[in-house]
Image (spheres, rainbow, N blue to C red):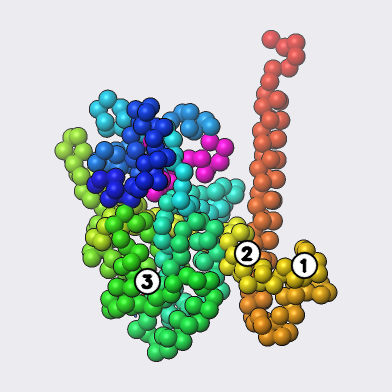
Amino acid sequence: MTLEQLGWTAREAEAFEPFATRGLRPARVIVGYGAAFRVYVDGEETLAEVSGRLRHDARTRRDLPAVGDWVAVRRNATGARATIQAILPRKSVFSRKAAGQETVEQMLAANVDTAFLVSGLDRDYNLRRIERYLAMTRESGAVAVIVLNKADLVDDVPDRVREVTAIAGGAPVHAISSKLREGLEALTPYLRPGQTVALLGSSGVGKSTLINQLLGVDRQVTCEVREADQRGRHTTTYRELVPLPSGALLIDTPGMRELQLWDADEGVQEAFDDIAELAAGCHFSDCRHDTEPRCAVKQAVDEARLSAERLANYHKLQAELAALAARQDVLARQGEKKKVRAIHRAIRRLPAKGSS
Ligand code: GDP
Ligand code: ZN
């Protein structure tokens, strides 16, 4: 694949200039294995490690590569390995705070142009969830496109589309049936050559079905390209940046598919920009539109200019974000405690003064 087929534009070319003069090559990350990566460089795939310098200078996980990143690499003499020396500025980033012992940010995808927010029009259908996915996508920097799948299962499709459009904040809404291949042509404008797309949505909404339709084949088969290694054995290569027949590139990482709510604070503000606008008229600048007097938002509800339901959703999401933030604080403090304990342990292990 050429750089252009991988999505390279004048923007990347400009950002890469200083690295070209250092003899580095442009590459795109197609799989992340934790510490190592698989990249496309000079028309081929190769394993790449992060340079010691980049790793050393990285303050957070964001300073390290993710699938979809454009990177500057140095190839070794045989070209079989490369080291990633730098990451080019990103257009968008999807990440999440990994649930578990510590709140570590997990990088899910970089440089996604369009995120398809997939919902099923059947049981899964939930406006609140769509609002959250919209907020996350706004936060990422990618453009959101709402896909209402399983249109074949309901008979009030136009009503649903209107309902979703009302909360979509300008994002396009398309009703399709992946299973019956109906309405898929609506997605073609986002699938132009070099465009990077990703699918987000809860389990069971039909993401795999849609991906297989976009690929024209089964993803399980496509992503596992069998390749001969040096000894002629066949090894299975798995890709998370997958070229589509349309010329677009699909980022499909396990974490991306199951992306959940995380600290999308800024995105939430924008997803509720109608409320943010009204809030400018509240008496208190830090009004929570709850029990505060002279609240312009509650007044708008009283006067039916804003639905009470929408304000309730806003409150609910704010509460969830607050809970998430509190959890992160606790985890951060626990992390500090662990560090302090480790230091104490290290001190105890030091030889006592005067001994030996
Ligand atoms: P995923 O978990 O989001 O990847 O969802 P899947 O692609 O595995 O689909 C979940 C189920 O929904 C499967 O049984 C699919 O056959 C079914 N499904 C997917 N798309 C459609 C659709 O457009 N219409 C109908 N009726 N069923 C669908
Ligand atoms: Zn208020």
User: Splitting the image into 4 quarters, where does residue 323 fall?
Assistant: bottom right
Helix, strand or loop for disc 2: helix
User: Compared with residue 194, is residue 335 higher up or lower down, i.e. above or below?
Assistant: above
> Could you give the CA–CA distance between mark 2 and mark 1, rounded to whole angstroms?
14 Å
Residue in the picture at 52% in, 44% down: 62
Residue designated by label 3:
206
Tell me the tag on residue 287: 1
Label 3 CB less than 8 angstroms from ligand 1: yes
Label 1 CB less than 8 angstroms from ligand 2: yes
Please name the amino acid that badge 1 sits on: Cys
Q: Position of residue 223 (x, y in %)?
A: 28, 54
- Residue 154 part of the magenta-drawn span: no
Numbered range of the magenta stretch: 58-72
> Could you give the CA–CA distance between mark 1 and mark 3, rounded to whole angstroms?
40 Å
Residue designated by label 2:
269
Helix, strand or loop for disc 1: loop
Residue in the picture at 45% in, 62% down: 143
How busy is the neighbourhood of tag 3: few (under 14 within 10 Å), some, or many (20 plus)?
Answer: many
Q: Residue furthest bottom?
A: 155
> Could you give the CA–CA distance between mark 2 and mark 3, rounded to whole angstroms?
29 Å
Viewport quadrant of the C terminus: top right
> Is 211 on the left-hand or right-hand side of 102?
left
User: Splitting the image into 4 quarters, where does residue 195 fall?
Assistant: bottom left
Front residue of 163/9: it is 9
How busy is the neighbourhood of tag 2: few (under 14 within 10 Å), some, or many (20 plus)?
Answer: some
User: Compared with residue 155, is residue 130 higher up or lower down, i.e. above or below?
Assistant: above
- Residue 327 makes an appearance in the image: yes
Front: mark 2 or 3: 2
